[in-house]
Image (spheres, helix red, strand yellow):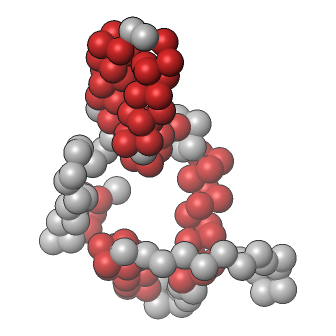
Amino acid sequence: MQPGADREVLRVALDRQAAQDFAQMANRLKAQNPHVRVQPSAFVSFLVSDFFATYFEKDFGILVAEFFDAKSYHEAQLQQAKAQGDFERVMAESLVTIRKIKARSRRKSGQKRKAKSSSNPESAG
């Protein structure tokens, strides 16, 4: 981000793994060129904007799966099933839909993402 560029403040807290991933990326960039200066806010701003422009549409279904609230969806379907009177069919379809959406997730049910091996940084690219 250029000095004096328009900024909008949005505080984002990274989980431990994401913070470690950021540190690895920053250290690798600095090791490649000692004149690289990595400001966390500017770096994350670049990543978000670049991801949006490059990958957002392609990975849209993955993002839906990652952040899908199966419990609230299931509860809404339960209310619909009660109203329609076709309880078994609606609830069975609800579970099929949940499984189909969640199947696109990169982190399968309950799994935390695993750190990629940093032993060979060239293989990460």
Residue 86 visible in the picture: yes
Q: Quadrant of the N terminus?
A: bottom right
Residue appearing at x 33%, y 35% in the figure: 102
Residue at the (37%, 42%) spot, across then down: 71
Residue 104 visible (yes or no): no
72 vs 25, nearest the viewer: 72
Q: Quadrant location of the C terminus?
A: bottom left
Give whichever of 63, 99 is nearer the camera: 99
Residue at 54% over, 83% down: 40
Residue 68's place in the image compared with 12, above or below, is above
> Relative to residue 107, is residue 80 drawn left or right?
right
Picture residue at 43% right of the left edge, 85% below the top? 30
For residue 39, side relative to residue 123 (left or right): right
Residue 12, quarter of picture: bottom right
Residue 68 appears at what percent x and percent y?
Answer: 43, 43
How many numbered discs?
0
Given residues 109 and 83, the one toward you in this image is 83
Q: Does residue 93 appear left or right of residue 39 in this picture? A: left
- Is 113 rendered above or below residue 27? above
x, y percent for residue 3: 78, 87
